[in-house]
Image (cartoon, rainbow, N blue to C red):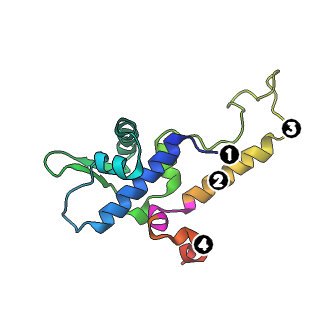
Amino acid sequence: MRLSTKGRYAVMAMADLARRQAALAEGDRAVTLAEIAARQQISLSYLEQLFARLRRRGLVKSLRGPGGGYRLAREAVNTNIADIVMAVDEPLRATRCGKSKGCMLKGERCMTHDLWEEMGRQLETYLASVSLEDLVSGRLSDPESRAA
């Protein structure tokens, strides 16, 4: 199972924002999307679309004027990866089945439906357990450090 570019780029951009914001002293300027786009090699117009969704979901706040840009709306430790992925409308389902119809030609569920559905739930649970702080600080390489 793969996330689309929407989900991956949103997580990359939010991690960049969290890292950059942590490096800036409190009260310093916000981070511009142009800076994130250059560092992460993501199209600026694509980032603008993603950040509009992230802003609507309360994950970032925008600051206008000189020194404007974006800041995290809450601390990185309180923002999980699942929130980011869902904010950009990225489904975490691994099945082809729709809500009311199965993936088979006659509308029934496939034999492996429950397997893929459970995998999607496990993925969502895992992404919900990982914070931006975990990602930025490198704690993912040592799962024990996240439990502390």
Which corner quadrant of the image does residue 16 belong to?
bottom left
Which residue corresponds to mark 4? Answer: 143
Which residue corresponds to mark 3? Answer: 111
Mark toward the start of the polypeptide (1 vs 4): 1
Mark toward the start of the polypeptide (1 vs 2): 1
For the residues marked 3 and 4, what is the alpha-carbon distance in whole angstroms?
34 Å
Residue contact between numbered discs 1 and 2, judged by CB atoms under 8 Å: yes
Residue occupying image coordinates x 72% and y 50%? 119
Residue contact between numbered discs 4 and 2, judged by CB atoms under 8 Å: no
Residue contact between numbered discs 3 and 1, judged by CB atoms under 8 Å: no
Amino acid type of disc 3?
Met
Amino acid type of disc 2?
Leu
For the residues marked 1 and 2, what is the alpha-carbon distance in whole angstroms?
10 Å
Mark toward the start of the polypeptide (3 vs 2): 3
Which residue corresponds to mark 2? Answer: 123
Which residue corresponds to mark 1? Answer: 1
Task: Tell me which segment is drawn in magenta.
Answer: 129-135
Q: Is residue 78 above or below residue 42?
A: below
